[in-house]
Structure formats: structure tokens, C-alpha cells
Image (cartoon, rainbow, N blue to C red):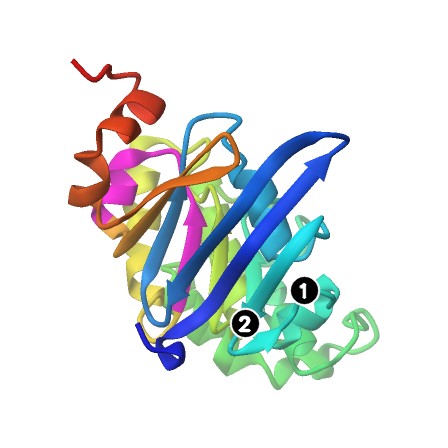
Amino acid sequence: MSQDDVILEARDLVKDFAGFLAVNHASFKVRRNTIHALIGPNGAGKTTLFNLLTKFLPPTQGQIVFNGEDITALPPAEVARRGLVRSFQISAVFPHLSVLDNVRIALQRQRGGSFDFWRSRKVLEVYHDRAMQLLHDVGLTEYAAEQAVSLPYGRKRALELATTLALEPQLMLLDEPMAGMAHEDIQRIQELIRTVSKGRTVLMVEHNLNVVASLSDTITVLTRGKILVEGDYKTVSANADVQEAYMGVGHG
């Protein structure tokens, strides 16, 4: 893999919480224009590693490199401006505004505007066409006028995806995109992620192995803060240590 192919690289990352190594010398690379999954059993350190990569936590040791630039010391907002955008860790919408306005506000934010949307509707009108295009991309056109709070859970997740896309990410980091979803919603959001990943890179933490198997080009398996194995689903699922650590299957 050439350096030009690499969009994000973790170099020897360590997170030490008072002697407990939640992330233990983790190094891996995310290839440009791929879907990369981070999996592992509960307590493996996935969330902590994700928080390091998105700058929500500072590493005790190590480097994070995005597009060839060391971003280890940069704050989350600065990293987001460079095109590394995190979604799904919280419900990132304004519940009592319309679906359309949620996306228009995200577009305004991307252009450097503040949240002065209550001052003038005209300010948001310039984003109307692009916002409608994004709603179309995530299957929410017919919900444009509805209040975000009234959306069913899966559609709310689709709206979060639209507001993330409004920030024009080069790399989207999705934190358990399928968490709490009904089966039919999982199918829909899975297809959405596949669609919106065209021309972008996606790194996701996900527990649903069917989703991981279906979507991911590369899977990194974490256990006890360390990277256990990396590869495509076939390679990873055949690994005896993965079967033991992740699926509770013994060696014999």
C-alpha cells in the first residue's frame, strides 16, 4: 500500500487510564475509498481508539496522521474542517426543526456560517437545492417538512447521515451505525452507507457481524487494547484467535 493510498494512519497509539492500557500500542492504516471496520469484544478498546482518532481524547503516546499530516495535537473541530467527520455517537439533529432545516443548517456550518438561522429564513434558502439533493440521497425527500423529532429511529439515523454528508467528509467515522435498530432499518442504513461511501472513505465501529461482512473491505480486530488481526472478512473470521476472543469459540 503506497502512502498516497492511505488516508488515515494510527502509529503506536497508547491510551493509559491510570495504569490501565485501554489502547495498547495500536498501529493500522485506512486505505482511501474503502470501508474499514473496527470490531472486537466488549472492553476491547474500540470506543477509546475511535475517540483518539476523532480527537475526543488525547493519546498518551503515538501519532495520528490524516492525508499525510500529523493531526495528533489538533482539536476535533479543526480535524472536521480538514474532512474527518464523525457521526452517530449522539443524535446530531435539532429535534424541533424540520428535516430540511437540519440539513440546511449543516450546509451553512460547512460554509463557515454560525447558527444564526433564526435571524433570517433567506440565509438558509441558498442551501435549499443542495439540502434536497442530500435528502434524496438518503431517502428522506418525502419527510423534508416533518419535524426531526417525529421521525422513526431508522429515519433519524438517515437524517444524521445527511447532516454528516453536508459537511463534505473525505473520511466518515461511524460509531455503531446499526445500534438499536430494527432489522428492516439495518438493511436500509446498510445500503445507505454503501451508497454514500462512493468516492469517500468510511471507518466504522460495528457490533453486527453480518453488516461488517457485507460492507467492509478491511476489518481490524481489537482485543484488550491490542490489534489482534487485520484483513478481509474471510481472513479475519478464519483466524483461531478471533474465533476465541470475539465469538467465544475454542481452538479445538
Left or right for 168, reference 114: left
Task: Read off the residue under disc 2.
Answer: 66
Q: Nearer the viewer, residue 218 or 17?
A: 17
Residue 199 appearing in the image: yes
Q: Residues within 10 Å of mark 1 (few under 14, many from 20)?
A: many
Q: Which residue is mark 1?
A: 72
Residue 41 vs residue 78, the one in the foreground: 41
Dividing the picture into quadrants, the one containing residue 99 is bottom right
Number of dots carrying numbers: 2
Point 79% across, 78% down: residue: 120
Q: Which is nearer the N-term, disc 2 or disc 1?
A: 2
In percent of width and height, residue 202 lies at 40, 61
Residue lying at 60% horizontally and 41% vertically, measured from the top left? 48
Element carrying mark 2? strand
Tell me the magenta residue range: 201-214
Question: Foreground: 53 or 135?
Answer: 53
